[in-house]
Image (cartoon, helix red, strand yellow):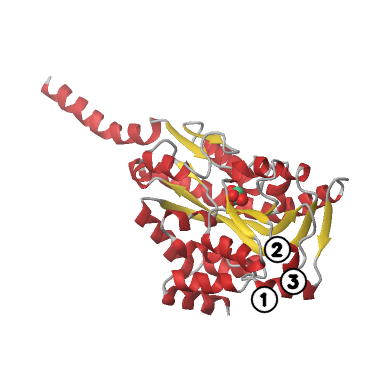
Amino acid sequence: RAFRLLFACWLYAALSPLHAATAAPVVVRFSHVVANDTPKGRMVLQFQALVAARSQGRIQVNIYPDSRLYGDDDEMEALRLGAVEMLAPSLSKFGNVGLPEFEVFDLPFLFSDLAQVHRLTQGAVGQQLLAALGRQQLQGLGFMDNGFKQMSARKPLRTPADYQGLRLRVQASSVLLAQMQALGAQGVALPFGESRRALSSRVVDGTENPLSNFLTQGLADVQSDVTLTRHGYLGYVVLTNPRFWASLAAADRRLLQTALADALAFGNALSATLDQQALTQLRSMPGVRIHALSEAERERLRTAAQPAYTYFERSVDKAFWAQIRKDLA
Ligand code: LMR
């Protein structure tokens, strides 16, 4: 009997870690603010599919897109409180939660292409930013591109004179507010999910978006003119709650991290295609006029927007800004 008891104990001890690691179901609630048919929306769907396949359905990712569960105003709080497990806010939404260094990505005309953005996100600056998230009880898991923003309104926005007196919706970023002010407009920070209503009721006159967001939020119905300014970058960081992340079995954490890396690569590869498709679709809409800028017009906007840099330089650490300039030189 003693032997049988001993054997039972050995069997239990031998099997239980395995049991715990392979059998416990895990649910990951992933909330975001854009439509499914955008680079971020498609990335999250890919993550869901990869996680389901690789865990044989044991780990489930439930997606809440389009601000359906939480919007810009409350999603970070929901993550901290454990009401959701993952988010992918744009990099422009971190100045508001005590991390002004993220607003470097909002500087107008800073990047000429995505390769330059990646020099920051994949280098020391990116590492520093991910580490800084810990200060706000957030854990960063990776960066993702949407692409470049274009201006829209009910008229073309080619020169600083065109911006005078307009109210333009921006994300809650001080650098974006400074950018609009420098151009002669008034920036109005509003949650993404409220953009369409604010434009249609004329609370604001215009806004800035990558074209896939412009198209999928139905903004073509309320904005007649899109000017291809390509003046700023929009990208994301995928976030989780550090307590949730630490509570996972190591193998599950690895599975999620690898599936996310693959989904981010998929989303990044797709973002340029979706941008191009959105442009083609918008060009075919009778109610929308697309305006290309000349180099000289773009240069004039770039010069006018410079005060946004002074603002940013004053709000961040000097060494951090020096590192960025070195990386981009
Ligand atoms: C916005 O608020 O304009 C964007 O951050 C939306 C998004 O997540 O792409």
Which element carries disc 1, helix, strand or loop? helix
Q: Residue furthest top?
A: 1
- Looking at the image, residue 165 lies above or below residue 4: below
User: Relative to 8, is 258 on the left or the right?
Assistant: right
Residue in view at x 57 percent, y 65 percent: 178
Q: Nearer the viewer, mark 1 or mark 2?
A: 2
Q: CA distance from mark 2 to mark 3?
A: 17 Å
- Looking at the image, residue 221 lies above or below residue 9: below
| Disc 2 residue type (three-letter) | Gln
Q: Earlier in the sequence, mark 2 or mark 3?
A: 2
Closer to the camera in the image, 130 or 2: 130
Residue in view at x 41 percent, y 45 percent: 253
For label 1, the crowd category at 10 Å Cα-Cα, with few meaning under 14, some 14 to 19 and many 20 or more, is some
The residue indicated by pointer 1 is: 303
The residue indicated by pointer 2 is: 164
Q: Nearer the viewer, mark 2 or mark 3?
A: 2
| Disc 1 residue type (three-letter) | Thr
Image location of residue 137, percent across then percent down? 36, 50
Q: Nearer the viewer, mark 1 or mark 3?
A: 1
The residue indicated by pointer 3 is: 298
Residue in view at x 84 percent, y 53 percent: 289
Q: Residue furthest front?
A: 165
Figure quadrant of residue 107: bottom right
Figure quadrant of residue 241: top left
Q: CA distance from mark 1 to mark 2?
A: 16 Å
